[in-house]
Amino acid sequence: MKWVNIFVSQLEELWKKYKRGFENFFYGLGYGNTPLQKLPPELNPYGNIYIKREDLEPEVENIKIRAIAGIYYLHDVRGELKGKTTVTVTSSGNFAKTLPKFLKKVGSNLKIRYFILKDLIDANPKLLEELEGDVVVVPESGYCPLSKRAKGRPITNAKLEAEIHEDFIYFDQHDGIGNPFGNLTLGEETSELGEAVIVQGLGTCGSTLGHYYGRVFSGAETKLVALLPEDGRQVGLRNRSEQGESENFREVTRIADKIIEISNKEAYETMIKLWENGIPGGISSGTNVAGALKITEKTEEDIITLVPDSLVNYEYFLQRKMKEVLGKDFEEYSEIFKKYKNRGKII
């Protein structure tokens, strides 16, 4: 409980101190203020589900820009980027692919060193071509200081590398305060709905914590329903065993009114329904909307969920997994996928 109080007070103190400066920085770059829309009526029989369209973030088409901006800003305003030449990160997804775009946008000369499990690279041979920086291949899983489980050795290596080299710095999206700090903007932007239930899938938990506390700090009455994958890991989400004992997950567990599980089949089927209704979201979007639809049957309150990204990073993964999850080949959806790929627009 002592840590929990420290976390909330530290987050609120940072927001009070840096709110105006960060918002000027973040919104000044052209990010944020993504649309909050009602889910199309074909998917929203009760009419009380709103979707926050992070797939419409300019240029990057995903929510990770908020975490990256928050982490970078806090390091910069504290003078911690002075003399640094290289950022170490542990990501192969949206965070990894958005970071170089952000650094170019702000005119930073920082180089990137990615620490990625060999299993992930083997599963996606195109990955090395998609990353802009040096890649350190971590051959096997090992001790992770965050979850205290036998997963996540890349995190350990990336942290150690930054400690060994004085000119390196670790950008921590997993347990650092910068991720929820950057996502406080998300909560402010949705606080126009003064009373609402947030329904949101858990990855690093930063966007969930930021969204929740951003609304709380803005005075909006907020409940939280958190989502986990029911059967194994989805892209961007961890199951209960993989979440382990990370501090961010413990905080989400403390504040959540409910934690429910969504099956891969539910996530994929809902993702395809989103495509059919003009919303080119990925698997995490399917998870979020599937969760919102379950909750809407039990409440008349407004529900807010995220479309966290576009289809841009999912093609190779879906080519391999669609048959396994839905019993249908990806080719059955290839035309609609091509229509929306890289667009991130309201159709």
Image: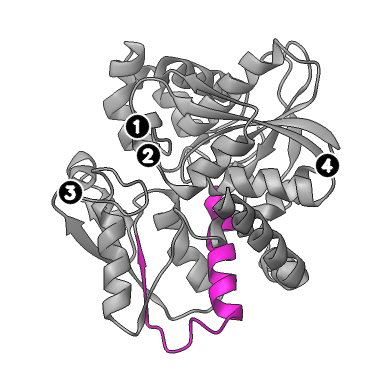
Question: Which amino acid does the dot numbered 2 rest on?
Answer: Gly
Circle 4 sits in a helix, a strand or a loop, which is it? loop
The magenta stretch spans residue 87: yes
Cα–Cα span, label 3 and label 2: 22 Å
Question: Which of labels 3 and 1 is toward the front?
Answer: 1
Mark 1 is surrounded, within 10 Å at the Cα level, by few (under 14), some (14 to 19) or many (20 or more) other residues, namely: few
Residue displayed at 79% across by 25% down: 302
In the picture, the quarter occupied by the C terminus is top right
Q: What residue would you read off at disc 3? A: 118
Cα–Cα span, label 4 and label 2: 30 Å
Cα–Cα span, label 2 and label 1: 6 Å
Circle 2 sits in a helix, a strand or a loop, which is it? loop
Is residue 282 at least partly visible in the picture?
Answer: no
Circle 1 sits in a helix, a strand or a loop, which is it? helix
Q: Position of residue 117 (x, y in %)?
A: 22, 50
Left or right? Give the position of 120 relative to 79: left
Q: Which residues are magenta?
A: 61-89
Q: Position of residue 300 (x, y in %)?
A: 81, 16
User: Which mark is on residue 220?
Assistant: 4
Question: Which amino acid does the dot numbered 3 rest on?
Answer: Lys
Residue 232 lies in what quarter of the image? top left
